[in-house]
């Protein structure tokens, strides 16, 4: 692509000039500060940057304004095109047996990054870009950002020599881009480790206002979510996106090998539980008092209705010494049962 400019010549005539073709690069954009800085560094060196944002079923949807909103704003600020790629079922398939294991939560960071780079590779090939950049910083994250992990990710995604990490590239092996003279080592960063001091100075230099906090955004790294995810994947051969959506809300109880119970914690979660319910699920709701919507899911759901109802009453406003009426809805029927609240020690062992 050529940049076309109109300028006035000596005699006042309009002259059309063409500037050197800009080389293209693809950036994996996360919305975090590091990937924004990587984009700015490449733009400064004369590249046209096109961004790819990856979403997975485990993105934290608590971002308030809806998934993808923030990243779209970042892309606009950076003046780059944005392509969003959603990794859904294939991501869940990978998570069943991540080749390179999981981290402290249920995060398969190496396999995950390899999938992300693979998606970016497709975009690179589509638009004829030279290489891919990311905001990875050497030694910043324990699982995926040490030297050997970075090399595994390149290998797994078929991108050996094609990934430039501008923030740390001065400390990493030479990439094809360097060998071909597209970038120079003296223009690349030498950032290492978890401190963000240098990045914050760079943010100032590039005019990035309110730089986002480090981390966040991936539920798989959260210990509590990791416990629920591990439980799901060890009880269901192939969980669905619906199963994963249910993991994101409520208090979770494993009642038996085949059956789970989830209790909403607030009005929004109650609504979400109703929306997530599928044929075969049983919904429970206390009548005449404020309280949760709960869901029983699994082969033996019917066997647990009485027990689940008493837990539902427990989390409601029904006074302790009174019976509560619980509406029990399954596929086509609705009935009411009367039950009292259960003592915490009788059910807490099922809580995840
Ligand atoms: S933190 Fe989550 S999104 Fe990031 S690499 Fe790890 S698994 Fe993937």
Image (cartoon, rainbow, N blue to C red):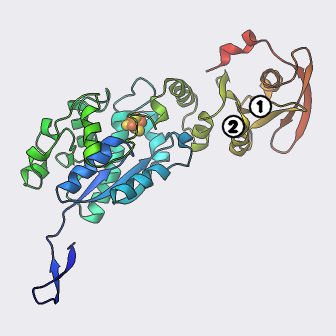
Verify CB contact (< 8 Å) between mark 2 and mark 1.
yes
Residue 142's disc number:
none
Can you say which quadrant of the picture contains the C terminus?
top right
Q: Is residue 22 left or right of residue 272?
A: left
Mark 2 C-beta closer than 8 Å to ligand 1: no
Q: Evaluate whether residue 175 shows in this view.
A: yes
Looking at this view, is 344 or 290 the one in front?
A: 290
Q: Position of residue 289 (x, y in %)?
A: 87, 30
Q: Residue at x 89, y 21 (%)?
A: 339
Give residue 269's mark. 2
Residue 10 in the image: above or below residue 116? below
Q: Check mark 1 vs ligand 1: CB closer than 8 Å? yes or no.
A: no
Split into quadrants, the picture shows ligand 1 in the one at top left
Quadrant in the rendering for residue 202? top left
Q: Is residue 5 left or right of residue 210?
A: left
- Residue 65 % position (x, y): 56, 48
> In the image as oriented, which residue stretches furthest toward the top?
345
Q: How many marks?
A: 2
Is 101 on the left or on the right of 159, as rendered?
right
Q: Secondary structure at mark 2?
A: helix
Regarding residue 157, the answer to whether it shows in the image is no
Residue visible at 81% across and 15% down? 342
The residue where tag 1 is placed is 292
Q: Quadrant of the N terminus?
A: bottom left
Secondary structure under the numbered disc 1 in the rendered image: loop
Q: Quadrant of residue 168?
A: top left
Residue at image location 24% in from the left, 64% down from the top = 128
User: x and y percent of residue 332 in the render?
Assistant: 85, 45
Dot 1, how many residues are within 10 Å of its Cα: few (below 14), some (14-19), or many (20+)? many
Give above or below for 1 relative to 277.
Answer: below
């Amino acid at each position: 692509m050529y940049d076309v400019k109109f300028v006035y010549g000596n005699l006042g005539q309009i002259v059309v000039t063409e500037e050197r073709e800009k080389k293209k690069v693809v950036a994996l954009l996360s919305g975090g500060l590091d990937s924004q800085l990587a984009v700015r560094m490449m733009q400064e060196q004369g590249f046209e940057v096109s961004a790819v944002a990856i979403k997975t079923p485990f993105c934290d949807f608590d971002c308030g304004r809806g998934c993808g909103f923030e990243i779209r704003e970042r892309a606009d600020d950076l003046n780059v095109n944005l392509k969003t790629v959603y990794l859904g079922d294939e991501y869940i398939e990978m998570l069943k047996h991540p080749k390179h294991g999981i981290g402290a939560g249920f995060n398969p960071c190496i396999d995950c990054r390899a999938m992300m780079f693979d998606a970016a590779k497709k975009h690179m090939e589509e638009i004829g870009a030279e290489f891919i950049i990311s905001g990875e910083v050497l030694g910043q994250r324990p699982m995926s950002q040490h030297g050997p992990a970075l090399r595994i990710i390149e290998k797994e995604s078929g991108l050996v020599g094609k990934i430039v990490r501008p923030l740390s590239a001065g400390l990493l092996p030479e990439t094809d881009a360097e060998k071909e003279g597209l970038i120079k080592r003296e223009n690349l960063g030498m950032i290492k480790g978890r401190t963000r001091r240098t990045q914050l100075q760079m943010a100032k230099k590039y005019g990035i206002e309110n730089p986002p906090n480090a981390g966040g955004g991936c539920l798989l790294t959260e210990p509590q979510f990791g416990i629920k995810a591990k439980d799901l994947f060890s009880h269901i051969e192939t969980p669905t996106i619906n199963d994963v959506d249910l993991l994101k809300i409520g208090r979770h109880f494993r009642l038996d090998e085949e059956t789970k119970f989830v209790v909403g914690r607030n009005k929004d979660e109650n609504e979400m539980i109703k929306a997530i319910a599928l044929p075969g699920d049983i919904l429970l709701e206390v009548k005449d008092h404020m309280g949760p919507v709960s869901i029983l899911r699994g082969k033996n759901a019917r066997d647990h209705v009485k027990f689940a109802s008493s837990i539902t009453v427990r989390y409601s406003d029904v006074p302790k010494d009174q019976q509560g009426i619980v509406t029990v809805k399954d596929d086509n029927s609705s009935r009411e049962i009367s039950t009292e609240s259960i003592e915490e020690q009788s059910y807490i062992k099922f809580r995840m």
